[in-house]
Amino acid sequence: MVIYGSIITPLSKRDTLFSDYSLLRVSPLGTIDWVEHEVPPHKLEEALAKHGETVESIASQFRELKRGEWIIPGFVDTHTHAPQFQNNGAGSQFELLDWLKYVTFPEEQKYADVEYAKKMYRRVVRGSLDLGTTMCCWYGTLHLEGTKVLADVLNELGQRAYVGKCNMDRESAPTYQEASADDSLRDTLSFITHVEGLSSQPSQALVRPILTPRFAISCTGPLLQGLGEIAKQHPHLPIQTHISENSAEIAYTKELFPHCATYAAVYDHYGLLRENTILAHGVHLEQSELDLIKSRGAGISHCPTSNFNLRSGAAHVGEWLDNGNKCGLGTDCSGGWTASMITTMQLASVCSKVVSYYTKGDDASITGRFSKTQFAKYQLPIQTVFWLATMGGAEVCCLQDKIGSLEPGKLFDAVHVSILPETDNMHIWYDESESLESMFERFMTNGDERNVSEVWVSGRTVGGRLFK
Ligand SMILES: O=c1[nH]c(=O)c2nc[nH]c2[nH]1
C-alpha cells in the first residue's frame, strides 16, 4: 500500500511533525518501507522515482487522502482491564478499595465461566480496536482458562498486546482469590506457555504474556517472591501492576509490608521493578520513588480518567517528565469510564491544567502558557499529550524501536483520522482553509471514535468506523 496525504507523527516530547503532503509505503510484511514528507502534487513523480516507482507502477496500491484526513501512529494503551468493560460508567460513588470490593471483584468473578469470557472479550477487543488502540496492555482476571480466551481473541482480531493473568492470593473476596501462592504461580506459568504458543516466532509475536501481580495488597510475600523468580528466569517478560493510586491503598500497603520504606520499594524488594515493568497510576509517588523507578528504568502509566473518576487525585505528570521517568497513558477501564485513548488524551490535558492551576503560584513568570524548559507547573502542550499516547506508551512497553511513530523500519500500526463533516461529529467544525496543526488541535480537543476511519496493525486493517 502507498498512502499519499497528510501525516502527523511525534518527533519528541515537545515536537510533532505536521506534513500536509506525505508519501508512505507499507511493505507486504506490514512495516513502513519508506516515507517522504512535503511532497506536493507536482513533486509526486519525483518522490516516487527516488524509490524506483512511478504513478503507474503503484496505481493498484495507491490510497490518496482528502484534506481533513490524515494518518497518525496507533494509540498505545498502557493500562486497562478487559473483564471490567461491562462496568464502564458504573460505581463512580466509590473510592478504590470499596470500588474493588463492591463493584469490580463481583464482575470479574463471572469470568470463571469460559462461555461468558468468550462472549465478552470479543466485544471488548473489537471495541478497543475500533477506537484506534493498536497496542494494549491488558489485565485479565485470576482465571487461567478465561484469560487464555482473552489472549486467543486478541490474536485472532489482530491487536498488538501484552496480556496478563492476575495474581491475587489474598485480600480480595473469599470466592475471588487464588487458593495459594503455589497455585497462582503454577497457573501463571501455564498461561505464559499458552500465550507463547500462539505464535511460531515468539520474537515477532503480536500477543505476549505479561506478569500481572494485581497490586501489592492482593499478593502475599511468597507470591511476590515466586513472581520475582519467574521474572529473573525470563528477563524479557514484561511486568505490570498498580502503584500509589489512592491514599488508603498506600497506607494499607505500608502496613502489610513494614520492612519496605515505600510502595515502590515493595516491588523492588521482590525483583519486580525493572526496565520492562509498567506501573499504573502513581498519583501519589514520592520523589524517592520516582528516582528509584527511574533508576530501574520502569515506566508509569498515567490514567487520568480513572484518577478523576475514583477521586484518586491529579497526577503531576509534568514532574515525572522533568524527572526523566518513562510515561504513557492508560484508559484503565473501568476505573476510567471509557476505553477511548482520545478521551484519555483530553483528560490528560485537563489534568495537567488542574495541576498547573494549583502549582503555578510560586513562579510569577508562569501565566498558563508553555515553558520551553520544563513541564511541571504548566499545562502539557497538545504535542506532549499526543506523544504520551503514542511514543511515550511505546517506550513504557519497551517497543519504541517498533511502534509509536511513523518512521521507516517501524511496524505500520496506524490510524486514519478524518474530521470531515461526513463523520457526523458535530463538535468539530471543519474549515478546509485551516492549517493541519489547527485541525489537529480540534481533533485532540473534540475528536472521538467517529473520527477514527480505519485502524491498521502491522499493515492489516483491524478496525475503525469504516471497517466491516
Ligand atoms: O484502578 C484500579 N483498578 C483495578 O482493577 C485495581 N486493582 C488493584 N488496584 C486497582 N486499581
Image: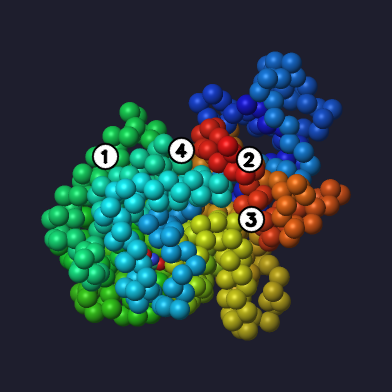
Figure coloring: rainbow
Mark 4–mark 2 distance (CA, rounded to whole Å)? 17 Å
The disc at residue 448 is 3
In contact (CB < 8 Å): disc 2 and disc 1: no
For marks 1 and 4, give the CA distance.
Answer: 17 Å
| On-image quarter of the C terminus | top right
The residue wearing badge 2 is: 466
The quadrant of the picture showing ligand 1 is bottom left
Residue under the image location 84 percent in, 48 percent down:
432
What x and y, as percent, mark residue 419? 73, 49
Mark nearer the N terminus (1 vs 3) = 1
Query: Is 9 displayed left or right of 135 in the figure?
Result: right
Whether residue 278 is visible here, answered yes or no, is: no
Real-space CA distance between mark 2 and mark 3, rounded to the nearest whole angstrom: 14 Å
SS class, disc 1: helix
126 sits left or right of 17 in the view: left
Residue position for label 4: 158
Q: Are marks 1 and 3 in contact (CB under 8 Å)?
A: no
Q: Position of residue 327 (x, y in %)?
A: 48, 59
Q: Relative to residue 269, is residue 468 drawn left or right?
A: right
As drawn, 176 above or below 194:
below
Of the numbered discs 1 and 4, the one sitting upstream in the chain is 4
Which residue is at a point 71% across and 76% down the rendered structure image? 367
Tell me whether the residue at label 3 lies in contact with that at label 4, contact meaning CB atoms closer than 8 angstroms: no
Quickly name the residue at label 1. 194
- Give amino acid for label 1: His
Name the element at disc 2: loop
Give the structural element (helix, strand or loop) at label 3.
Answer: loop
Does residue 41 appear in this view?
A: yes
Which type of secondary structure does the marked residue at label 4 adopt?
A: loop
Residue 156 disc label: none
